[in-house]
Amino acid sequence: MNVRTPALAIYLMAGEDLPDAAAAAVAAGATAIEVGIPFSDPLADGPVIQRAAQAALAAGMTPPRCLELLAATRARLGDGTPLIPMTYAAIVERYGPVRFCADAAAAGATGLIVADVPPDDGDELQAESARNGIDLVQLISLTSAAARLELACRTSRGFIYVVSAIGTTGARDELDVERLRGLLARVRAHAGELPLLCGFGVSRAAQVSALRAAGADGVIVGSAAIAALESGGVGALAELVGSLAGGL
C-alpha cells in the first residue's frame, strides 16, 4: 500500500453513498479512504461512528455488501488511492479470515484495520492479509507498553495507526500534543520509514498542523467526516476535507 505523505485518511461508514462520498473526499484532498464495516458492538468507536454503524445495519448493510461497495469505490477512484476496510474480529471470524482477505483484495482493498486484534494475537490474519497483498495496519496508543509498541512496529504494514486520544473515537477540542510528541518519537525509533498516522479526536486543521509539527506523517479523521456528511452531504464533507488538507 503506497501511503503518500503528508497523508489525510478519511474514514467513511460503508453505505450506498460510499463511492460518491469517497470521490468527493479525494477530490478535496484526502489521500486515503478508510471504510468502516459496521458492527453491532464497536468498542473503539464513539457515538458518531456508533450511530452511523447502527444506521448502516438497520439499512441492511452486510459485510459482503460492504465489499461490493468497496469495489464500486475502487472503480470510481482508480488505483491510486489506498482503500482500507476497518472492522472488528467478530466480523472477520464469522466471514472466515481466508475468504475475507481474498474477497477484500478482489474488491480493491489495499490495507486492513481490525481494531480489536492485537499484534500478538493475529497470526492467521497477518498471514492471510499478506498472502492477498493487503497491508495489515497495527494500532499503538498512549497507553501501549514498550513490548507491545515494539511488536506492533515490527508487524504493521503500510503505516502505523497512532491513537491520538485515550478512549473511543470522536472529535476532541484539545489533544495532548506534547505527550503525543513523545509517543511519536518512541514509535519512530522502531518504525523506521513506515508512516505514522494519528487518529482519534482529530477534527480541525489546527490539530492537523500541530500533529504534523509533533512528528506525525499524517492524520485519520472519522467522526468529524461522518458528522459533516450527515449534516450537509458530500458538499459539507468536501469543505471539511479541504480545510483539513490545508493543515497538512
Image (spheres, grey):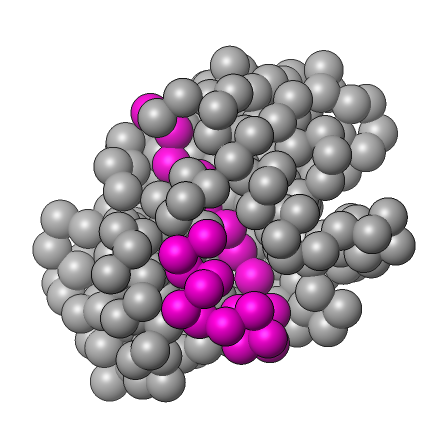
In the visual, does 135 lie left or right of 161? left
Residue range of the region highlighted in magenta in the rendering: 80-103
In the visual, does 163 lie left or right of 241? left
Q: Residue furthest right?
A: 58
Q: Nearer the viewer, residue 85 or 175?
A: 85
* Residue 92 seen in render: yes
* Residue 241 seen in render: no
Q: Is residue 98 above or below residue 120?
A: above
Q: Position of residue 51 (x, y in %)?
A: 82, 54
The residue lying at 28 percent from left, 31 percent from top is 4
The residue lying at 30 percent from left, 80 percent from top is 123
Q: Nearer the viewer, residue 165 or 110?
A: 110
Q: Is residue 217 above or below residue 73?
A: below
The residue lying at 71 percent from left, 20 percent from top is 234
In the visual, does 189 lie left or right of 78? left
Q: Position of residue 63 (x, y in %)?
A: 64, 56
Q: Position of residue 43 (x, y in %)?
A: 66, 73
Quadrant in which the N terminus is drawn: top left
* Magenta-drawn stretch contains 100: yes
